[in-house]
Amino acid sequence: MIQNSDIKRFKPLNVTADFQIASSVGNHDWAIPFIGRKRSHQLMQLRPIYDAGANLTLSSDWNVNDINPLAGISTSIQMGKRGMPDIYAAIDAYTIKPAISLGLTISPAVLK
């Protein structure tokens, strides 16, 4: 859960936002009794963080989520305005973006 006012802080702080989203399609009404309606809308805000330019990664928290990255890629696109903008961004979030988070050098040619 991320407060909207904190989203813009990820990029300047060079913080990676990692999400395990294999089962996050739809709303989060299940969370309302635990954290309230307002906070339930602050769960899984992939697109705002992506749009803010932060390094966003997708992963699985096995055995809670499916270990298959294709499930997470599919879910991240099905999330609509809260999810990833397209399949290319979702694949990057499972591949290139975690490498950047780990400090691995990426050639600019690879990113094209």
Image (tube, rainbow, N blue to C red):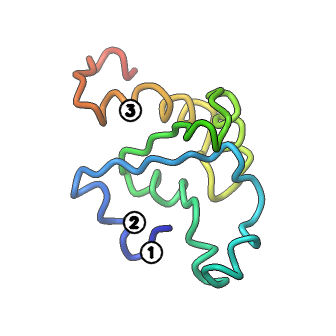
Label 2, residues with CA under 10 Å away: few <14, some 14-19, many ≥20: some
Distance, label 2 to label 3, CA atoms, is 19 Å
Instruction: State if disc 3 and disc 2 touch (CB < 8 Å).
Output: no
Q: Name the amino acid type tagged 2.
A: Ile
Q: Name the amino acid type tagged 1.
A: Gln
- Name the residue tied to disc 3: 98
Distance, label 1 to label 2, CA atoms, is 7 Å
Residue 15 % position (x, y): 29, 52
Q: Name the amino acid type tagged 3.
A: Pro
Residue extending farthest to the front is 63
Toward which corner of the image does residue 26 lie, by quadrant?
bottom right
Identify the mark at residue 111; answer none if there is no mark: none
Identify the mark at residue 7; answer none if there is no mark: 2
Of labels 3 and 1, earlier in sequence is 1
Q: Residue at x 58, y 66 (%)?
A: 43
Of labels 2 and 3, earlier in sequence is 2
Q: Residue at x 67, y 27 (%)?
A: 70
- Name the residue tied to disc 1: 3
Residue 6 % position (x, y): 36, 71
Local SS, label 1: loop
Q: Nearer the viewer, mark 2 or mark 3?
A: 3
Q: Residue at x 70, y 79 (%)?
A: 32
Q: Residue at x 68, y 73 (%)?
A: 31
